[in-house]
Image: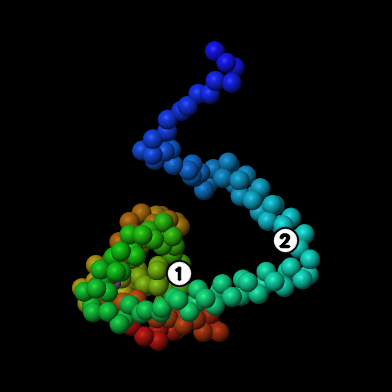
Amino acid sequence: MSPYCSVTVNIEKSDMKNYPKKKLDKSSPAYIRQRQIANARKRVYLDKLTPEQREIKKAKDREYYYKKKNTMQRRSIYDLPEDKQLKLRAQWNRNTKKYRQKMKFIKLSDNRRVLMAEGYTFAQTTPRHYYCSKKAKGCKAKIFLNKDETEMILYNNEHNHNAPIYKLTNKGFYVKIAG
Ligand SMILES: [Zn+2]
């Protein structure tokens, strides 16, 4: 047998599909390391650019930005019929669950403290129990907190209405402008 005998490996397309590009977990050390290397490489690339090349890059970036901006069409949820608004809101609700569960206490102009999550406000009824400010209008959204009010124990943020719009005044309290 010749030493140069080649071995053919048949790779079917279907086999390739079984080996997708490895995606690292964003919190894993390997991912962080990978990002650090990529960022360092990018920094070297950017540092090596001559002022002229830098200007070219800037112009290209600017062009890309405006191209992207022009193709993006602005749509408002308020232009849609009400049933579609609710459907879309439910979809957002599901897709952004991880990011949404942030809450903060805000002070209103009448010195009341309410809980704000995702732009909706919740008023305290009993210790640790907060209900949507539109509870009287049939909204069933609610938040239950732990003892020291740092974590949510129960989080139901499905509303039958749009989120109110609040504005932070320079005196440090919030004023409702709409909703
Ligand atoms: Zn509500």
Which of discs 1 and 2 lies nearer the camera? The answer is 2
Question: In the image, which disc is placed on residue 171?
Answer: none
Foreground pick, 38 / 78: 38
Residue 117: image location, x then y, percent: 40, 67
Residue at 39% from the left image edge and 35% from the top image edge? 12
Foreground pick, 66 / 127: 66
Asked whether residue 135 is in view, the answer is no
Foreground pick, 27 / 152: 27
Residue indicated by mark 1: 105
What is the crowding at mark 1: few (fewer than 14 residues within 10 Å), some, or many (at least 20)? few
**Label 2 sits on what residue type?**
Leu
Q: Work out whether mark 1 precedes mark 2 in sequence or the reverse, and give the earlier one.
A: 2
Split into quadrants, the picture shows ligand 1 in the one at bottom left
Q: Secondary structure at mark 2?
A: helix
Asked whether residue 7 is in view, the answer is yes
Q: Is residue 76 above or below residue 87?
A: below
Residue at 73% from the left image edge and 69% from the top image edge? 54
Horizontal side, residue 87 vs residue 130: left or right:
left
Residue at 49% from the left image edge and 41% from the top image edge? 22
Residue 72: image location, x then y, percent: 44, 75
Quarter the C terminus occupies: bottom left
Q: Is residue 117 above or below residue 111?
A: above
Q: Is mark 1 within 8 Å of ligand 1?
A: no
Answer with the quarter of the image where residue 154 lies.
bottom left
**Label 1 sits on what residue type?**
Phe
Residue indicated by mark 2: 46
